[in-house]
Amino acid sequence: MEAVALELTGVVALGIGAYWLAWRLHVPSILFLLIGGFVAGGVLGLIDPDALLGELLFPIVSLSVAIILFEGGLSLDVAELSEIGVVLRRLVTAGALVTWVGSALLAHLVLGFDLPLATLLGALLVVTGPTVIVPLLRHVRPADRIGSIVRWEGIVNDPIGAILAVLVFEVVLSGGFETVPDAALGILKAAGAGGGLGLAGAAVLVFVLKRYWVPDFLQNPAALAVALSVFTISNLVQTESGLLAVTVMGSAVASQRIVPIRHIIEFKETLRVLLISVLFVLLAARVTPAVVVSSGMASLLFIGGLILFVRPASVAVSTVGSELSWRERGFLAVMAPRGIVAAAVSSLFALELARAGYPGAERLASVTFVVIVGTVAVYGLSAAPVARWLGVASPNPQGLLIVGAEPWVRALAMVLHGKGIKVLLVDSNWAHVAAARRFGLPAHYGNILSEHVMDELELDGIGRLLALTSNHEVNSLAALHFSEVFGRSKVYQLPPGGGERGRLQQAIPTHLRGRFLFAREATHGVIADRFDAGAVIKGTGLTESFDFDDLRRQHGEDTLPLFALKESGELVVFAATDKIAPKPGHVVISLISGPPE
């Protein structure tokens, strides 16, 4: 018993440690998870997943993958499909077909797989990896449209590829392709069962939440219970259709506007990290060095073919005649890492084929393992520089991520938005978010301190954070949280009060906060009180004959300058420690007393 507990503890510790190391080095976590599991299991023999969990290994893997895909579905809002629907539909149909056929041919010609096994491997490699893609998108921050396409493809392709792989697997086990009509029928059953049960699960969850039948503290486990029930029932109707069901359920829940789902979204974060950490370590630990080495140079050539030929061909077919620019198509062609679903399903198939006595079955999981490591390494390390080279990621984004959406913050955002500055408001108060949206401002409902916010937010064109809530601790934590994304020099927060420099820094140490905004006396309370008393936020253009001193004389010495917009379009954020010196040609955005002119 102690040995089992020690081994389980080691798996969790290794997984979380790999995640932390990847965070520190700013590389995809899956690399360290796979390498760590491989070394601990296949090389050193410290972890034996089959002996540790026995028959429970793959049921646990299946349920965990279901939770991960449900979480992925929660990040998919169907409203995005109005802009990306055509390309996405082609990617998951014609593009998936090209990937399947191209991967199968490569496996047959390069790896020497027989046609049935090559066809199965090709189906497995249709799936991309949302567990890898989402963190990469967060790091790269590509343009809205192309970022949405990549994220949707990564999440939607997983259940599609898994269903396709299961059907091919059944054909391979049957010993021939005479069951192809049955496989086609299976696809229809999977789509019907997965889609229908997913929507039904979402409807049930929304129904009980709308009537307050579930208290807040039970919303997370209730959502988990419904998702797992939908997954299991759907699989009983059609094998592996459960993955589609939980993805559809997550997207349907995320897209509805009837009930808030903050508790449901927040619950996924810690659980997702833990599940991904453990799963990758366990599955990588099952791969032995001998099997990996046996693939040799052929595996490297296979990976090269996938990256250089199969993926570009899939994107070319899917985007022909679309509105995507060649730069966007180029970025799409260099973003197809494989992830947890490919690892889990290939391990299961390899085990079942080996039990059935299929020759060469053990190579299926090892090649998939090598492909996952190779594609993650290549795409993960090249995505950011390629995106910058192609111009689909902003080198100097001027937009602002604003924490808070109360009335004076909305007024500020409206002025900035009117001047062409991209703004995105985040608030955990639904009334504030709804009001912002009514004014046409992009606003996200959620907790800025939640890890999922990093996955959900579209940060294209946004390069700075303004924390403007009345909670100083939240402002500080938000600034600290996003300093890894924007850099410490580009995260700002309102001063907590005190006025004097020493007292400000004593209230919140410099290394635990962002830069103080506007002026030392410009606390949340001061600004909110002035706004409530009739002050307004206004943009004023400066000229040679009307400088900043004239602006102060016109509107009073209590005029509080907030930003300066240069003629080049660059936005200057005034910090409390800055010497404010707007020049002619600048538009100064200020808080001024009295009604606008």
Image (cartoon, rainbow, N blue to C red):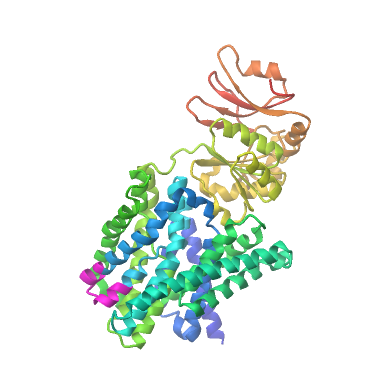
Judge whether 236 appears above or below 320 on screen.
below
Residue 540, image x and y in percent?
Answer: 61, 22
Locate the C terminus and report the quarter of the image it occupies: top right
Residue at screen point 39% across, 64% down? 338
Residue at screen point 60% across, 16% down? 547
Q: Give the range drawn in magenta.
A: 105-120
Number of dots carrying numbers: 0
Judge whether 370 appears above or below 258 on screen.
below
Residue 35, image x and y in percent?
Answer: 40, 68
Residue 52, image x and y in percent?
Answer: 49, 84
355 vs 21, left or right, is: left
Residue 108 colored in magenta in the image: yes
Q: Nearest the camera: 381 or 314?
A: 314
Residue 172 in view of the camera: yes
Residue 284 in view of the camera: no
Residue at screen point 53% across, 62% down? 73
482 vs 46, left or right, is: right
Dominant SS in magenta: helix
Answer with the quarter of the image where residue 587 lies: top right
Answer with the quarter of the image where residue 574 lies: top right
Residue 59, image x and y in percent?
Answer: 50, 80
